[in-house]
Amino acid sequence: GGVALEILEEIPAGKRKLQNYVSVSNAFEKARKFKQAYDVFDLMVQDGIEPDTRASIPRLRILAKGGRGREALKLYENLKAEGGAKAIAQLFFWAIVASSTGGGPAVGEKILEEARENGHDVARLYPPLVDTYRECDNEGVLQLFERMKQEVELNAQHYACVLRACAKGYWDEKALELLGALQASGLDADVRLFHSALLACRKSAENTEKVLELARKCGAELRAIDYSIAQRSIAFGGHPELAMELMDEMVARGIGLDGSNYAAAIMACMRSDTDHSELALTLLREMVEEVEEVDWRHVETVLRTCALADRPDVSFDCLKSYWRWTREGVVDDEDGPNANRFAAGLFAQEGKIKETTALVQLMVADNDFGFYKAKQMFAEIARACQVAGDSAAALSMVRFILKTVELYHSVPALHSAFGYFLNNQDVPLAKQTLDLIREHNMVSSFYLEQQTRNVIDEEWLDPDLRKLIVQLIESGHQVEMPGY
């Protein structure tokens, strides 16, 4: 589009023709730059060329595709008033497309009737009307489809638009019914129809398998994205054998496997009624060895599934691989979620003190214990202790942090520990933690005030402890931390 515009600008203004502007606009439209595509027509008017029907229909199309429905419908009314455009079927087609963002199904129905009154075949106009219903009133699609069957001879495009509505509404049984009717009618089934049907069945592993069987019978060449949708549905149903069969089918057809395929298969193993944990570990090792690009979402899927299946050992294997991938640049964790804290949070929710603590120890050994992570990770350990009802374990972690983590990171972590105990009214452990902080000369008035502001005036707080806290805060003491 940009290159086409430069060529147009090289033509002297007086020698430019309407078709030149239409061609440039089409180039922007193909790149889905609808605003620039429409601006070309404004430039045309500025250059003194008035748009006729050849330019007006593309203008209507661009407004409709660009989501500017109300502007498109206003242009539609103007073109109708001129008279000549009513003979062009595309006028009504793109006006119905515009109705999805410019008035809804009622407006689309009105335009359909206007097209019928002008002698146009409405069969081609039903798909955009179905899409308008899908966007604004998905439940109304099925009623419209029954009417379509009575009024027009259905083609693959009619089935396709209704299947898209099935995908939006998770209408798996209806999707299977439509595929069956399509097959019985002798119409060719495009792979995109099966894509919509798989989306409709993504909450039912059984119906997903039925769609796959129909696709194989019809000879539809499913794509990588279609297999991924099917595999994830099968994974939620806990069918590792079927998930593995799909991976084998992909390989046989020359479709490369990615992290999502392995993550789905691992999910199927962990959600199965029978123990497939060894297969899950084998798949995890294959993912590490075979997949060139790993997405955080794939790792997150494995971690969540392992938490549900109570398999921290698999979680740790996954995390170790993720840390290595990060170091080697296979994945970029700079802007993504923190895998370590995410996993610790999953363990903490279940009160798994041992696993949460072990994760922190692995982080320390891996030099992955930054300033903010220190506070966040202790908060997760504290939560695990709280769920398990074992605050003493948290004090052990305080001593571990004190011995292992450098001063720069341990100061906020230790104050977080003190705040955790105090906010949970565990005064004895709070006193012990504060004694350790003072003993090692780590008192920070700033962190202390942060951790105690919500409890300092509570009646249950020990008067002597309250007095000490106030004194330490008022002292304004800050720990000297190199590099801070």
Image (tube, rainbow, N blue to C red):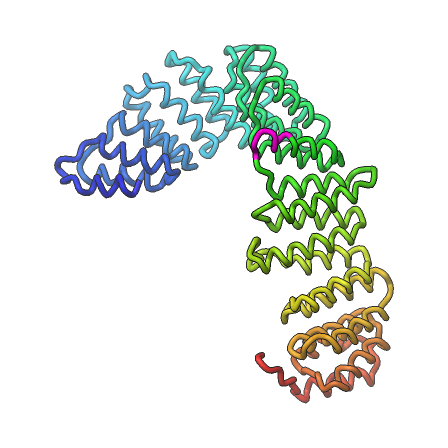
- Closest to the observer: 141 or 408? 408
Q: Residue 363: within the magenta?
A: no
- Closest to the observer: 322 or 28? 322
- Closest to the observer: 112 or 224? 224
Q: Is residue 84 left or right of residue 97?
A: left
Q: Residue at x 66, y 29 (%)?
A: 201
Vertical order, 268 against 170 (above or below): below
Which quarter of the image is occupied by the N terminus?
top left
Tally the numbered discs.
0
Q: Position of residue 200 (x, y in %)?
A: 63, 29
Q: Residue at x 73, y 38 (%)?
A: 268
Q: Position of residue 126 (x, y in %)?
A: 48, 20
Task: For residue 460, say whether it is visible.
Answer: no
Q: Is residue 55 left or right of residue 139?
A: left
Q: Is residue 10 left or right of residue 355?
A: left
Q: Residue 254: within the magenta?
A: yes
Task: For residue 25, say whether it is visible.
Answer: yes
Q: Is residue 354 left or right of residue 192?
A: right
Q: Position of residue 45 (x, y in %)?
A: 22, 37
- Closest to the observer: 467 or 163? 163
Vertical order, 68 against 364 (above or below): above
- Specify the quadrant of the image occupied by residue 66: top left
* Residue range highlighted in magenta: 249-255
Q: Residue at x 72, y 37 (%)?
A: 236
Q: Position of residue 258 (x, y in %)?
A: 60, 42
Q: Residue at x 71, y 73 (%)?
A: 413
